[in-house]
Amino acid sequence: MIRDYNMKEYKKNAFRQSKYRGEIASRVRVPGGVIDAKSLMRVVEIAEKYGDGTINLTNRQGFEIPHIRIEDRDKVNEELQLIIENTNVNHGQPGEGYPASGTRNVVACPGKELCPFGCYDTKALAAKLDKMIFPNNHHVKIACTGCSNDCAHVRLNDFGIIGQTEPQYDPDRCIGCEQCVKYCSKRSVGALSVVNGKIVRDTNKCIGCGVCVNYCPTRAWTRSKEHYFRLELLGRTGKKNPRLGEDFLKWADEESVCKIIKNTYDYLDDYLDMAAVEAKEHIGYIVDRTGVEEFLKYAMKDVELGPKCEMAGRMYWGGKRYDQTNELRKSMFRFSDREE
Ligand code: SF4
Ligand code: SF4
Ligand code: SF4
């Protein structure tokens, strides 16, 4: 029998509405996609005990356990407690499950702990950010990727964090093989050249990808001790005008990036349209309303960018727009006219 229930409250408690009457799905939060094997087994147990034995892997590196009967919610929440603790997710009363679901799981690529191209520990930053911003009902998406390959697709998030390194050159170790020049040219942006037998890096071109470090056989190139970040702002998916995040900062430090993200919650408190469906809006739509300057007034409050940091002179999100008479379409008509 289906009892009266408030789906809004269930959603806040990280249960998804199901298309099957009387059922919900439990969403298990896994910051950075890291879960210990025992907790994973517990996810399996919940799926077998309260679901139909299946588990969905979500796009944001969490789990979703479908086909849970609504009346089993409290029991599922109790069983989630150990998983919540082991994944180090902030929570309220033990046994009551997740206290919010608006701010989404922070995504991370494998990063430097696993991947040779990683410029920083993405999983650690994802865990730190998750601790800093969760629980919160604001709809915010963050992703961390270890280098400019962007395996985590961070430009589809409100905040996309891309690792950078400032490669350090030791001419005494260099044997002049030019591997670094070749790979920077073929796999990156071509920032290296040979001048008088030494390798010179064009600092304006270099994107801090670390490819030169990876392909130098003598360790004449090494990574900088400092970690730097490129911050992409306000990418979004969705039905209405999806768009990629835009470059905002390059060579930023971790503290500044974290502060900007934290500050954004004050902006959302003040400008979110509470009349929006489920009081949920992508930040980008709010910025479209208030103007980017107002957003940055909040986001940059008390942020002290380091001397290396570069900021975009102008922020513009084009997004996708369609109409029946645009120039591309006209040119296609002209092209087909010629063919006839
Ligand atoms: S983004 Fe870079 S660090 Fe992350 S998995 Fe891809 S190649 Fe590795
Ligand atoms: S870090 Fe990347 S862009 Fe910069 S010099 Fe090395 S390979 Fe080229
Ligand atoms: S790959 Fe290393 S050793 Fe070869 S030219 Fe570049 S810096 Fe020198």
Image: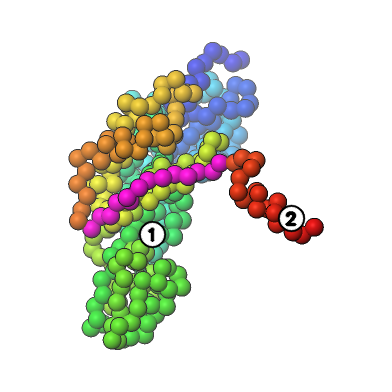
Q: Classify 10 Å Cα crowding around label 2: few (below 14), some (14-19), many (20 and above).
A: few
Q: Which residue is mark 1?
A: 147
The amino acid pointed to by label 2 is Ser
Q: Main secondary structure of the magenta part?
A: loop
Q: Earlier in the sequence, mark 2 or mark 1?
A: 1
Q: Find disc 2 in the rendering and name its residue.
A: 336
Task: Give the Cα separation between the discs numbered 2 and 1.
Answer: 43 Å
Ligand 1 within 8 Å, label 1 CB: yes
Question: Element type at marker 1?
Answer: loop
Q: Is residue 205 left or right of residue 331?
A: left
Residue 69 location, quadrant: top right
Estimate how packed mark 1 is, as few (under 14), some (14 to 19) or many (20 or more) residues with alpha carbons within 10 Å: many
User: Range of the magenta residues?
Assistant: 308-321
Measuring from the top left, give residue 257's x and y in whole percent: 29, 46
The stretch drawn in magenta includes residue 85: no
Residue pictured at 44% horizontal, 20% vertical: 275
Q: Is residue 106 left or right of residue 225?
A: right
Q: Amino acid at mark 1?
A: Cys
Q: Is residue 138 visible?
A: yes
* Residue 111 image position (x, y, % from top left): 38, 57
Question: Can residue 286 be seen in this snapshot?
Answer: no
